[in-house]
């Protein structure tokens, strides 16, 4: 290295030199008076680096609510013998249960104003891909439990006989009235079409107990295309023969790769 780089010069630079300045000092080939980072006269300026546009966000079940103008009362129905309060405040309710992934979104609105309801407590429960509900030891598809008193809202509930709580969960709506859940597409059991169960609570009272349904064509595609659904064939009830089915409780659905999205606005008073 030449004597052009001495301790005084290094300290004068604050003790920091770029690689270009270091080579300049060692070789004596630098311009000396040029501004740092300036392009030499006659040299072509370098093109700016190419940028990759950010990937669009992944589809969400909430997207299915964005253009839904429905402002109708969601039909109330029975909870049946499979309801008990699992006290499981969570959005991902799968607990490792096998099945086709299903992302859900619900918006709670209050009629007649049709305004979103923040702070509503929403309970979801459903059977697994083989038609079995959690919490009941040795239960066959569709079976629940014996009466077990009432929950904290005063609603009748079944007595759980084991500690499982798969596919059960609770969420609270945000300012937009929306909750989301990650679950699996439900299976079937005798005399019932494929469905979900929901409860909505406001001010320590239950304002909705309902069941929500899927288009039969979607269910046929899911149940016929993947395990473990194919291990439980022979679905005996479709929407048009189910005792509780109503078009007002039919979920909006959309495929997204290997998962399904589903959503519905829940109208309460």
Image (spheres, grey):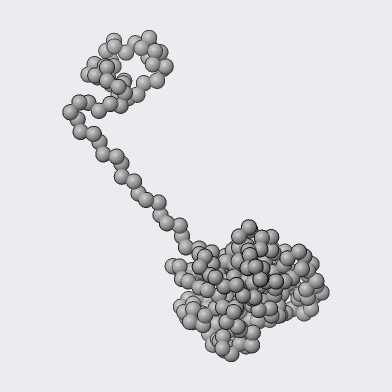
At which x and y percent is residue 171?
66, 62
* Res 160 → quadrant: bottom right
Q: Is residue 63 left or right of residue 33?
A: right
At which x and y percent is residue 196?
62, 75
Residue drawn at x 27%, y 12% is: 2
Residue drawn at x 66%, y 60% is: 118
Task: Name the image quarter holding the C terminus.
Answer: bottom right
Which residue, as the protein is rendered here, is positioned at the far right? 149
Q: Is residue 184 above or below residue 11?
A: below
Q: Is residue 217 left or right of residue 204?
A: left
Residue nearest the viewer, comparing 164 with 20: 20
Q: Is residue 55 above or below residue 218?
A: above
At which x and y percent is residue 236?
57, 89
Which residue, as the protein is rendered here, is positioned at the far left? 42
* Res 81 → quadrant: bottom right
Does residue 6 appear in this view? yes
Q: Is residue 16 above or below residue 265?
A: above
Residue nearest the viewer, comparing 252 with 101: 252
At which x and y percent is residue 127?
62, 76
Residue drawn at x 56%, y 88% is: 240
Residue nearest the viewer, comparing 197 with 246: 246
Q: Is residue 48 above or below residue 88?
A: above
Which residue, as the protein is rendered here, is positioned at the far front? 113
Residue drawn at x 53%, y 85% is: 233
Does residue 94 appear in this view? no
* Res 156 → quadrant: bottom right
Task: Name the image quarter holding the N terminus.
Answer: top left
């Amino acid at each position: 290295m030449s004597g052009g780089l001495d301790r005084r010069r290094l300290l004068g630079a604050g003790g920091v030199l770029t690689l270009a300045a270091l080579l300049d000092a060692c070789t004596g080939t630098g311009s000396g008076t040029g501004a740092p980072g300036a392009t030499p006269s006659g040299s072509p300026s370098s093109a700016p680096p190419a940028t990759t546009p950010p990937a669009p966000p992944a589809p969400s079940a909430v997207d299915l609510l964005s253009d839904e103008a429905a402002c109708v009362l969601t039909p109330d129905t029975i909870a049946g013998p499979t309801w008990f309060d699992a006290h499981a405040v969570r959005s991902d309710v799968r607990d490792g249960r096998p099945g086709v992934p299903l992302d859900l979104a619900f918006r709670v609105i209050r009629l007649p104003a049709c305004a979103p309801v923040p702070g509503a407590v929403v309970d979801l429960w459903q059977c697994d891909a083989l038609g079995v509900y959690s919490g009941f030891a040795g239960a066959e598809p569709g079976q629940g439990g014996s009466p077990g008193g009432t929950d904290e809202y005063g609603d009748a509930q079944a007595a759980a006989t084991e500690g499982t709580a798969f596919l059960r969960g609770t969420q609270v709506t945000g300012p937009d009235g929306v909750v989301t859940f990650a679950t699996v597409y439900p299976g079937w059991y005798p005399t019932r079409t494929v469905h979900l169960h929901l409860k909505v609570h406001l001010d320590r009272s239950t304002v909705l107990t309902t069941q929500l349904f899927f288009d039969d064509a979607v269910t046929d595609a899911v149940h016929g295309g993947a395990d473990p659904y194919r291990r439980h064939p022979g679905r005996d009830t479709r929407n048009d023969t189910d005792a509780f089915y109503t078009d007002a409780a039919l979920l909006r659905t959309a495929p997204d790769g290997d998962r399904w999205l589903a959503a519905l606005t829940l109208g309460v008073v």
